[in-house]
Image (tube, rainbow, N blue to C red):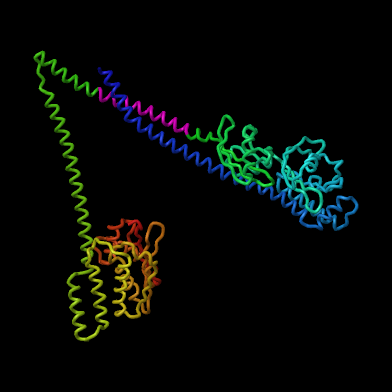
Amino acid sequence: MRKRNFIRRFLYYAGIIALPIILAFTIYGGFMIREKQIEIEENAIKSAYALRDNFSLVLDNAETQYDILCSNPRLSISLRHYLSHGKASYLDSVLVNSILSNFASLTNNASYVASVYYYLEGYDSILTSNMGSVVKLSQFSDLKWLDSYHASEENQWIESRNMHQFSYSEPVQVVTIYRKLDMFKGVVAVNFYADSLRQVLNAGSDLDQFFLMDKDGNLLLTGAEDDGFFEYNRDTLTAAIQASPNELLETWLSDGHSAYYTRLVPAGYNTYLLACINSSSYYQTIYPLIIQLILVLGAVCGIALWIAYTITRKNFQQIDYFINVFSDAEKGIYSSQKPGFVKDEYDIILNNIVQLFVNKSFLQNRLALKEQQQKLAEMTALQLQISPHFLFNTLQTLDFKALEYTGSPTAVNRIIEALSDLLKYSLEKPTSLVTLGNEIDSLKKYDCIQRYRYEDKYILYYEYDEEIRDLPFMRLILQPLIENSLYHGIKPLEGTGFIKLKIFSKREFLHFSVIDTGVGMTKQEVKDLLLKINQAKSERIGLTNVNNRLIMQYGENSKLRILSKKGLGTCISFRIPLSS
């Protein structure tokens, strides 16, 4: 019974823990495989275009040679004279030497270029870069290209062949690009080393293998160790090219063992590039997941064994206790501890734990509520320091009396009206937010009042975008900062001072700056001022009020920052998160 109970509990807890883990690993594994498939396809597409771009650079070199040799009629005539042995003039020799210099520059700068041939029908000589001169065909070791030229009816084509650079050397595999001449019967042939060309084409790509083929399915160049994959899919690729020669082909192909994501793109000169990425990347992603799953399942089995053993042991200890109590009772031995007492004790302990938790939660909630009320009281008190309510009614009375004596609105009425609006604005519910536009409009009324007092003593500029006016904002934040700049920065000046309010958004914050051209402060004075406004009881009520409210509403990162230079002016700034 004990063993059966242990096995049942082990299977139960192992299933509870293992099933969600297996499900999570399955979902995660499927997601990873899908992501890897998308990554393979994107890499194949990107690498195919990189491969085609590299091949285009190679073709450009061949096209450049053709343009140099054939675009200038005078140069073509000089080349023909030079090949005729004896008809060439001094100018012909100079032009041909310039062509040979261009050949030498090409082969020196592009290591994958083996040689360039210039051939005209009817002459027994060719102009070649590897000899650097005109060579008779009877003395030239590489002539297989000539057979290809006479046999082809195309104007331009590419073939893969073995080139004998010298009669005493081993043949070298090259890829030759042919282009027939327009003015005369002849051809320009550019030979590229196959190994060097393979490295150039494969640069900057993540391909497992690539193939260069012509429209008839002939393999011109391969980037793999063997061409088994290409031979296996030759018919499929040839049929796809013949069906739509100018369209891209992208699909999954197999060589009988592995699957490859392939991208077939046209490459010029009736050739096509096949870019391939092996699906083995799937398994490289899955293997670590399987190993991790096995390790986790092993840990789960260990944990389930321990839990099953612990609970079974505890349960059977309680069962043994009751059996012993009954057994002792049969023998006339009565224990002072009873099962009911043990059960009640557990209930008392559990109730005490629950009660302690409830009491703790209740105390925490009361403490949080008390802190919130304290903050609200502090904010209300700070608001009351700025705007006593009785002044609003008194100002309205003064406005009526002034209008009664003058008979028409005067500057006094406008001042009283602006001040009344300011007091009304400040007497609103302190916790309610206004828009930034409301705050700026309130600041302008304050500015209007100060204009009557100071006239041209200061000029206040505003720099902000109109779209930020609808953002929520705390009331009475900007006016104390402008007032501070006016009284402590501009007022001591002998002439006119300037104050600018600048508001702009950057990244995730809305930044505010009040900049003045006042008397400024030394570094020590700035340090002392920051110390004062960060104290609960401070002489600088306005700045302390603003600083405390910013910290309460937006956190420590929104506190006031002060920069100043003696004799130049002061900048007070803060920022608030746009998410607020």
Let me know if residue 37 is in the magenta part: no
In percent of width and height, residue 304 lies at: 32, 26
Quadrant in the picture for the C terminus: bottom left
Q: On the rendered structure, is 88 left or right of 361?
A: right
Is residue 188 found left or right of 536 in the rendered image? right
Of the pair 193 and 263, the residue shown nearer to us: 263
Q: Which residues are magenta?
A: 286-312
- Residue 259 position in % (x across, y down): 55, 34
Determine the image quadrant of residue 302.
top left
- Rendered view: 483 above or below 577: below
Residue at position x 83%, y 48% in the image: 120
Question: Residue drawn at (20%, 44%), measured in percent from left and top?
Answer: 361
Asked whether residue 532 is in view, the answer is no
Verify whether residue 310 appears in magenta.
yes
Q: Is the N terminus in the top left, top right, bottom left or bottom right quadrant?
A: top left
Measuring from the top left, give residue 62's x and y in whole percent.
72, 49
